[in-house]
Image (cartoon, helix red, strand yellow):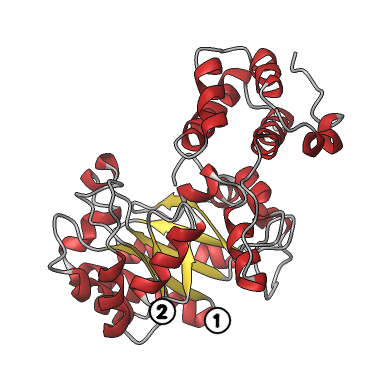
Amino acid sequence: MEGVVDAETRALLSADGALDWCVTEFVRVVDARLPPRVFLRHCPELASTEAGSAHGPRTPSGVPVTLQLLGSDPVALAANAEQAISMGVRRLDLNFGCPAKTVNRHDGGASLLRTPERVYRVVSAVAEAGKRHGVSVNAKLRLGFDDKQLALACALAAESGGAEELVVHARTRREGYRPPAHWEWIARIRTAVGVPVVANGDIWTLEDYWKARSLSGCRDVMLGRGMLADPWLARRIRHWQQTGERLAPTPWSTRRDVLCRYAEQKHADGMADKFIVSLLKQWLNIMRGRDAESAACFTAVRRETDLAIFLQRLDAWATTLPACNASRAALSWRPA
């Protein structure tokens, strides 16, 4: 989720309390101990974390935030884990799942899945640092690099290294994000290891959630792009768990409200208008694959570069206006 799930996104999507925890974009570790400002850039929630806090960074609504590290050097990763812990991090995630060619070419993410021993060494080094401070470490995996032959070996290596939880994206690096997700393969991993396993990949709807849980046997799932496509997805799942009832489809007005609030926050942070527009288009592009109104709106605004006009056009597509009225005053700003 690099370049997609920043602090503002986490704050917006966790505001209803339906999420149990969030994960940052990865902090890229090469061979040096990074300065605090790097961790604050990726996890601004640390700025409001009290020294010695037992719960660590949280979103404004109180949802715990896990810091994710990506790299291949065990010594450097352990040193940066120590740095993050000194700043208040209480939960660390190690990224062995990123399929990006640039990341893999520089020996990060899913590239390590070709050698289970390397997965073990990385997890072991970071987990040892975590144990000294009572900080938990988990690993984000895929089913392999080119194929699934080492899926179980990598999962067992991560467990042996000290990972307290595994999050498994149900595809290989070669498969990228192409459907289908092989949730049944997660079941093989879950039965092979003794730590909790979380299912991930292609969970866009309530039905997907149920299928992922049923085929994987996992109690928990991790939501990625599905939460961007439907900001109510976690709420929808939680509501069904508690009541057995389905929520109505997420109205366009709610989607628009999320996008406008995101733009408002980015503007307040001093981001240039052209970059805000680019991020809004990126998010709307994810929404349009699962929602007809979002798709129509994307077509209407895809060539727009002026932020004020872009927001006005989003407003014009708010066909269900009552849900927007409460925040209309706050969203009526127009950037200079």
Q: Residues within 10 Å of mark 1 (few under 14, many from 20)?
A: some
Whole-number angstrom distance, CA of label 2 to CA of label 1: 10 Å
Say whether residue 304 is left or right of residue 318. Answer: left
Q: At 74% from the left edge and 55% from the top edge, which residue is drawn?
A: 60
In the rendered structure, which disc, 2 or 1, sits on the residue that comes first in sequence?
Answer: 2
Amino acid under disc 2: Glu
The image quarter in which residue 162 lies: bottom left
Whole-percent x, y for residue 144 in the image: 20, 61
Q: At 55% from the left edge and 81% from the top edge, which residue is drawn?
A: 134
Is 331 rendered above or below residue 254?
above
Secondary structure under tag 1 reads: loop
Pick the front one: 190 or 255 = 255
Pick the front one: 172 or 120 = 172
- Please give the label number shown on residue 128: 2
The image quarter in which residue 200 lies: bottom left
Mark 1 = which residue?
134
Whole-percent x, y for residue 299 in the image: 50, 19
Amino acid under disc 1: Gly
Question: What is the count of numbered marks?
Answer: 2
Q: Residues within 10 Å of mark 2 (few under 14, many from 20)?
A: some
The image quarter in which residue 307 lies: top right
Q: At 48% from the left edge and 72% from the top edge, which residue is drawn?
A: 220
Secondary structure under tag 2 reads: helix
Pick the front one: 74 or 172 = 172
Is 132 rendered above or below residue 210?
below
Say whether residue 233 is left or right of residue 58. Answer: left
- Please give the label number shown on residue 311: none
Whole-percent x, y for residue 88 in the image: 63, 66
